[in-house]
Image (tube, rainbow, N blue to C red):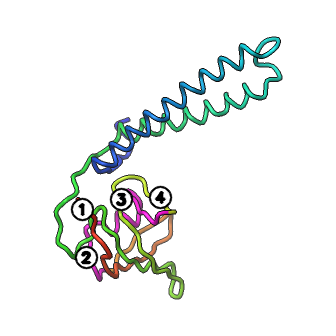
């Protein structure tokens, strides 16, 4: 595990990971119980031609994968304190208006929240671990910074800070 990349996260984000892990373990245990019941209630060898059992096995594999990924994140967590920055700098939990340029005439302007955990794109959250999140963290309003995704380089301009949430 020493050769794995550290996963930067706030204390709040770390606690969420622990809660998520407990929930996944609870779901895994419930699935195990359902598999046992399905196996016992099936005719013959219990597993042969038992669609419910096969579905539960698939669910078990998915849950195990999620649990293992979460454990790896927790083990590689680099818990950070939200730093004290100047009012015009982008910090964790700040909501900022960004102009993201993909090319000369290809850009989008939208509001995003920088979070100290995995971001949720449906909520316009950007993780501090993402290329764009890492690029804007601690930068000043008005700055234009570059970030790289695969071999492509993009630019983002920090237009304004919309709201700084309480820390």
Camera-nearest label, 1 or 2: 1
Q: How crowded is mark 1: few (under 14 residues within 10 Å), some or many (20 or more)?
A: few
Q: Where is residue 7 in the image (x, y as percent from the top left)?
A: 35, 48
* Alpha-carbon span between mark 2 and mark 4: 23 Å
Image quadrant for the N terminus? Answer: top left
Would you name the residue on which mark 2 appears?
A: 140
Of the numbered discs in the image, which one, if any, rests on residue 115?
Answer: 3
Report helix, strand or loop for mark 1: loop
Instruction: Name the one closer to the observer, 163 or 6.
Output: 163
Q: How crowded is mark 4: few (under 14 residues within 10 Å), some or many (20 or more)?
A: few
Instruction: Name the one closer to the observer, 18 or 72.
Output: 18
Q: Which residue is drawn at 34% across and 70% down?
A: 95
Of the numbered discs in the image, which one, if any, rests on residue 120?
Answer: 4
Q: How crowded is mark 2: few (under 14 residues within 10 Å), some or many (20 or more)?
A: many
Would you name the residue on which mark 1 appears?
A: 166
* Alpha-carbon span between mark 3 and mark 4: 9 Å
Segment tinted magenta in the rendering: 123-143
Q: Do the residues labelled 3 and 2 touch (CB within 8 Å)?
A: no
The answer to which of marks 3 and 4 sits earlier in the sequence is 3
Of the numbered discs in the image, which one, if any, rests on residue 10?
Answer: none
Q: Where is residue 41 in the image (x, y as percent from the top left)?
A: 75, 15
Q: Where is residue 17 in the image (x, y as percent from the top left)?
A: 39, 42
In the rendered structure, the answer to whether residue 95 lies left or right of residue 66 reads left
Q: Is residue 162 above or below residue 57?
A: below
């Amino acid at each position: 595990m020493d050769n794995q990349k550290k996963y930067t996260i706030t204390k709040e984000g770390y606690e969420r990971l622990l809660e998520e892990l407990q929930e996944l373990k609870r779901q895994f245990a419930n699935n195990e119980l359902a598999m046992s019941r399905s196996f016992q209630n099936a005719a013959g060898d219990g597993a042969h031609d038992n669609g419910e059992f096969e579905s539960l096995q698939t669910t078990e594999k998915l849950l195990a994968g999620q649990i293992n990924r979460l454990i790896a994140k927790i083990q590689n967590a680099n818990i950070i304190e939200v730093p004290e920055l100047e009012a015009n700098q982008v910090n964790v939990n700040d909501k900022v208006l960004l102009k993201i340029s993909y090319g000369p005439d290809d850009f989008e302007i939208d509001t995003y929240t920088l979070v100290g955990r995995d971001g949720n794109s449906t909520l316009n959250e950007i993780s501090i671990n993402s290329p764009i999140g890492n690029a804007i963290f601690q930068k000043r309003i008005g700055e234009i910074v570059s970030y790289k995704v695969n071999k492509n380089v993009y630019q983002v301009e920090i237009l304004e800070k919309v709201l700084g949430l309480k820390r």
